[in-house]
Amino acid sequence: MLKRYYSSKINSYITPGKVLVIYGPRRVGKTTLVDNFLKNYEGRVYKSTGENIQLKNILESNDFSKIIPFFKGYDLVVIDEAQKIENIRQGLKIIIDQIPNIKVIATGSSSFDLSNKMGEPLVGRQRILKLFPFSAIELENNFGRLYLHENLENFLIFGTFPEVITATNFEEKIEYLNQIRDSYLFKDIFEFEKIRNSKKIIDLLRLIAFQVGNLVSHQELGNNIGISKNTVERYLDLFEKSFILINIRGYSKNLRKEITKTSKYYFYDNGIRNAIIGNFNFLNSRNDQGQLWENFLFIERLKKQHYLKIYSNNFFWRTWDKKEIDLVEEREGKLFGYEFKFGNKKVKPPKDWLGSYENASFEVINQENYLDFIL
């Protein structure tokens, strides 16, 4: 059984009077994480899912006379897929406010239906953990650093979803990723947003997949697939909220010639990106090695920031004359610029970057030094 970063930490996050919210993409192991914790938990546990009709009716009622007797006597309440319960935040607030010393864990796959619903009623009453596909940090903890070197190409092609990591052959990995693409990837969007035109959604995501690491024009995307700029922006927002894409914006404080009002998008997982475009070829027969490398480094760095609590504002930097830096981290009162290169080509820092920002640094991340960047 592979250990997750939070495997030995969950108990320290669970406290009476607060809800522990665990959320993230579908199929990353949220339920497994909780189930493994419960194996050694000493106490009376109520565990169910947001699809349980009886549980939905009780929590959606907001009725003290129904909720309190139902949960009273339990030490810990665990609700999986909590986003499926309307007004879940109010029901959870009643539980933790009215039943002394009770503890609650709620898991969910969609940020627009879980974390957003965990809004005002749970201010000061929740702790939030975000779970990703396996991180390089977790894989090193399970297998050692040599495993990362030996499997780098696999990570770039197939990503790091738990069942991809444990699959015994390439066919299993591809079958599983295609299953996520076809059955789970858009499930929250279709369920909760009542979107019917799935073809346009898939077409848009395919266009983004081919533009990983590039500047994206919402107007141009809309023109390509025949939808309005506003609809493009709405769909992209849903992709972010359902943990498919991550958006970063341009950094600027000084130069008029810096680009700031455009976006770059990355996928939460390389395997999902490759499933979207239907390409699982290995690196020697691809022309997008640079995009795969950039997406991999970006998301692994994001996982590191999250798990190790490295508080940073993330941007890219680019000027109108096409000088650029792939990732800028604004933290500790400084600017850290990182350029991602799959090969070992030497790259000089842009003069405008170091000349305009006294507190800025620049580093190229390649196959020789990437592990220090993501571990």
Image (cartoon, rainbow, N blue to C red):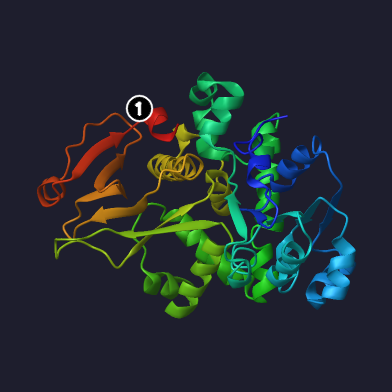
Count of number-bearing discs: 1
Is residue 223 something one can see in this rendering? yes
Residue 222: x and y, percent?
44, 74
Quarter of the image where the N terminus is located = top right
Vertical order, 101 against 40 (above or below)? below
Vertical order, 191 against 306 (above or below)? below
- What residue did someone put label 1 on? 369
Q: Quadrant of residue 362?
A: top left
Is residue 281 something one can see in this rendering? no
242 and 8: which one is in front? 8
Residue 258: x and y, percent?
19, 61
89 and 373: which one is in front? 89
165 and 336: which one is in front? 336
Residue 109: x and y, percent?
66, 57
Task: Tell me which residue sits at (51%, 19%) in the image.
Answer: 146
Secondary structure of the residue carrying tag 1 is loop
Task: Tell me which residue sits at (57%, 68%) in the image.
Answer: 201
Q: Quadrant of residue 133?
A: top right
Task: Tell me which residue sits at (66%, 39%) in the image.
Answer: 162
Q: Residue furthest front?
A: 100
Amino acid at pointer 1: Asn
Residue 353: x and y, percent?
16, 49
236 lies left or right of 354? right
Q: Quadrant of residue 11?
A: top right
